[in-house]
Image (tube, grey):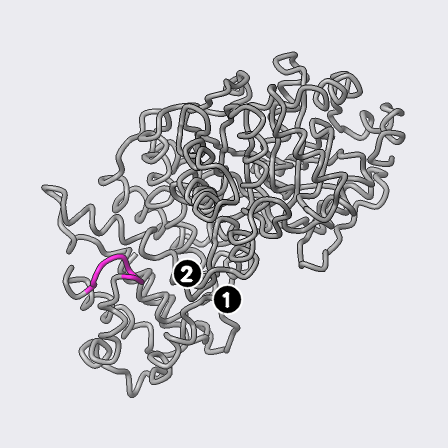
Amino acid sequence: MKLNNSGLTEKAPWEAAGYALPSFDREAVAQKTKTLPFWIHFGAGNIFRAFQANVVQNLLNNGTLDRGLIVAEGYDYEIIEKMNHPHDDYSILVTLKSDGTVEKTVVGSVVESLVLDSDNAPDYNRLIQIFQSDSLQMATFTITEKGYSLTDGQGRPLPQVAADMENGPTHPESYLGKLSALLYTRYRSGQKPIAMVSMDNCSHNGTKLHDAVAAFAQAWSENGRVEKGFYEYINDPGKVSFPWTMIDKITPRPNEAVEEILKKDGVEAPAPIVTTKNTYVAPFVNAEECEYLIIEDAFPAGRPALEKGGFIFTDRATVDKVEKMKVCTCLNPLHTALAVFGCLLGYERISEEMQDTTLKKLVEGIGYIEGLPVVVNPGILNPRDFIDTVLNIRIPNPFMPDTPQRIATDTSQKLAIRFGETIRAYERTPGLHVEDLERIPLVFAGWLRYLMAVDDHGNAFELSPDPLLDTMRPYMAVFHLDSETQPSPESISRQLEPVLSDAKIWGVNLYATGLAGLVCDYFSQMLKGPGAVRATLEKYV
């Protein structure tokens, strides 16, 4: 069973092994797509293959669509060269359901794959041709939040970006420079409309994409590399829109257990590869069953009926409410709490933590008791139902190979949004009192305890990458596990005052909100020796 055009001419073995196959005429779809492209996606990674590509496949199968997807990869060209091309753009979606069943689908909706490389003349010229097409309605993106950055960590322009802004759109080298140059070709071919739709998991993603592209348009206009009208084109939402979206679907790295399933089925060479840019990619994607994509309905060139595939179209304000509901209350805070305490308590799977009654009760309290009172119901998704799904289906799914160590990455960058927003909402909401928050301060104390890099058994462990580790570790170095010389909450407060007052970390000054004392009290109790973290959780949860 080879995953390519020739291997799929024999459908019987695939169907006998339980694989759902494309039921549309792929050759006809491919030809029409290449002639009349309507959707190009940038970012050939796992979430695109598991989500957007599968939705389009379903719509091709039921006749809603008659054209497929074109995908371009602008960061790691090896994904296209070593995975898409050898498999004729087919991939296998393995959906890992919480009831223990596995659903296997051969996805064939992607019918053309290209590299976004100005040095690759055939592919780059084809991309120019696509962007000049009257039929093109949208370009979408899953390039990660970092993909929209024009500066480094110190705020300095990235070298390729600076060069592209100076040299203009003729032969760009940076990702956003190449994208902006493609838009310029669309402008020059008649100022044709298009929706530029970021589908990355970051707040106000459309604005991030707009600001990056507009920066190039402005620089090129000012230095005479393009006509002044290009900047006006980019900033005219009737011609170029940058909708906000909220996406939610877990697609971890290719899992060995899934690879074994495919091998036993007879699929040839299902093993993942690791590219030179350290991307893990395989002929298959393993993913959870739950998925959400909420999109601001702003498409100046029109759009197909993608709502028939499960996408939800609405206005910008509603997208913002859904994003805040997920990130600030109903999912991300629960994940962070489990990540911090999972590392301390020795768990290796997030799903296993949900079998721990204390941890389960902790995240239920964060979501239902402390979070829900300040959630603004977006109307299109019910917050309580969303949390129900998160806590009862998504996080406990034993087939999702997600680890607390992975989710603990960059925690210092997440606390302000995932918990600080709730604290601020308590401050401004009549009838609610910040001092009633007990579980969120417990997570804060847990993170401080985590930063000691010693688990609850007294064993050292490796902290996950975080940009503030070098800043935080000196403050934590004075603390150790010792029931005899345990520091008082007051002495902890004096030592950590610069940390606890830093609103960039917590979203608020913990002293100003009155929560610093409780955080120090919890942290003090977690220092009483091995087992103190568990004891503190059981005492207060």
Whether residue 107 appears in magenta in the rendering, the answer is: no
Q: Position of residue 440 (x, y in %)?
A: 28, 56
Which quarter of the rendered picture does the N terminus lie within? top right
On screen, residue 445 above or below 210: below
Residue underneath mark 1: 464
Q: Position of residue 478 (x, y in %)?
A: 34, 85
Residue underneath mark 2: 411
Q: Residue furthest left?
A: 430
Q: Residue furthest front?
A: 224
| Residue drawn at the location 74% of the way across and 45% of the way down | 120
On screen, residue 213 above or below 150: above
Residue 91 figure quarter: top right
Element under disc 2: helix
Element under disc 1: loop
Q: Which residues are magenta?
A: 504-510
Q: Position of residue 517 (x, y in %)?
A: 18, 68
Give whichever of 408, 118 is nearer the camera.
118
| Residue drawn at the location 20% of the way across and 63% of the way down | 509
